[in-house]
Image: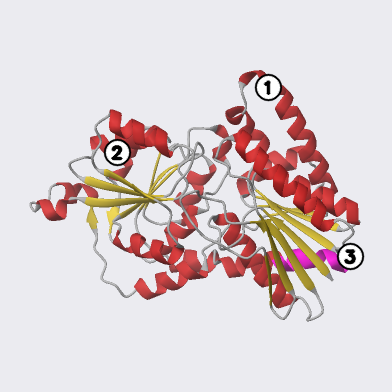
Amino acid sequence: MNVLLLTFYFPPDLGAGAFRSRALVDALLERLSPEDEVEVITTAPNRYAQYDSTAPDVETSDHGRLTVRRIDLPSHQSGILDQSRAFLAYAWQVARLTRGQHYDLVIATSSRLMTGVLGRYVAGRVSARLYLDIRDIFVENLPFLLPKGTQRLGIGFFSTLERWAVRYASKVNLVSPGFGEYFERRYPGKRFTWHTNGVDPLFADSALQGAEAERREVSAADVASASSPATSRLRVLYAGNIGQCQGIDRILPALAKRLENRVDFLLIGDGGRRETLQAALQAQGVSNVEIRPPVARDQLIEHYRQADVLFLHLNDMFCFSRVIPSKLFEYAAMGKPIWAGVRAFPAQFCQQNIANTAVFEPCDAASALEAFETLVLGSQPRQAFIERFHRDKIMGEMADDVLALMCWR
């Protein structure tokens, strides 16, 4: 059997899509026979301009059973035009590399729809089955991405592409149960599964190592009234993308200003709104926010351990009412209090599954401050969550679903 995986991101690149793809490949290789082969076509590391990582153009491992091909992209930023040019370069090379090849199964994991559409094109051309792994509802994001004069045309065009891909797929996985209403209404009778993101083994192992550490249980309000200035300041950490989807520039300047006597914020990441955020912080005279470039995950764990609170925020957009932010799984494994600006389905997910999470309305500093006071500081292990959402477990189940398609032939 020849299996092709199309994924825009793959390690050593950073991001949930990269780690998810690697875990799926590992799970597939465990289940396939020694004669079966998996080919991954991805990009050279490009997730963050400030994160420098290199990888070979072609990499073979597992006794020749796995081949990873990485495509160099033109220099790009996070704008939609730059990202479109980058994807076109990727798609062109995928079409070239797959021409004349034979695949029994094509897997496409896609957050912005077009990798899924590319998977549909390749699968159709080689008469292979297609497994789609959809990590976002791109069509619902378009009103926030396209200029007003082009929205109707753009939404119609991308909706057509979505139908073309989804209807062809033998099976479609949705990374969030919150996506169900959208896809089940549009594609009645279609087979959907829900294999979410999960806790990476690196963070699960770290949680186990830290479970024996002594726990502090002091309310945030108590810390504010502590007599010693050295112990009264909290360390709040945000790690991830600083882009339009996160809306950090819309919440943090006002929030940090109101907490300047109590909290130091550390942001580790990069993205298209970083400069906008820095300008807003400077304009409001905020001095308790530090922004550092992305780091490798083993270094990030140490920052998590040093933090008192882990911060997460999604922009005030309807399209984010259905998602489960991948960062939640990472945060939850660390056992630290989570301060999350989310609503609707992700807020419900937090409240039902992650203890000691304070949820507030996105882009609302007053709501954030109110939620902050409810946090209980200190490490509280979430072992049941880790076991339920361990990435290896989830990707193992997903790999079984993928390979079950081949039993139909």
The image position of residue 334, as x and y in percent, is: 39, 63
Residue at the location (89% across, 65% down)? 408
User: Considering the numbered disc 1 on the image, is that residue within a helix, a strand or a loop?
Assistant: helix
The image position of residue 213, as x and y in percent, is: 29, 72
Mark 3 highlights which residue?
Answer: 408
**Vertical position of residue 62 compared to residue 140: above or below:** below
Q: Main secondary structure of the magenta part?
A: helix
Amino acid beneath label 2:
Leu
**Vertical position of residue 4 compared to residue 152: above or below:** below
| Residue 1 appears left or right of 314 | right
Residue at the location (61% across, 23% down)? 147
Q: Give 362 or 162, whichever is nearer the viewer.
A: 162
Residue at the location (56% across, 33% down)? 318
Residue at the location (41% across, 74% down)? 208
Disc 1/disc 2 C-alpha distance (Å):
38 Å
Magenta-drawn stretch contains 408: yes
Structural crowding at the residue carrying mark 1, measured as other residues with C-alpha within 10 Å and reported as few (<14), some (14–19) or many (≥20): few
Magenta extent:
399-409
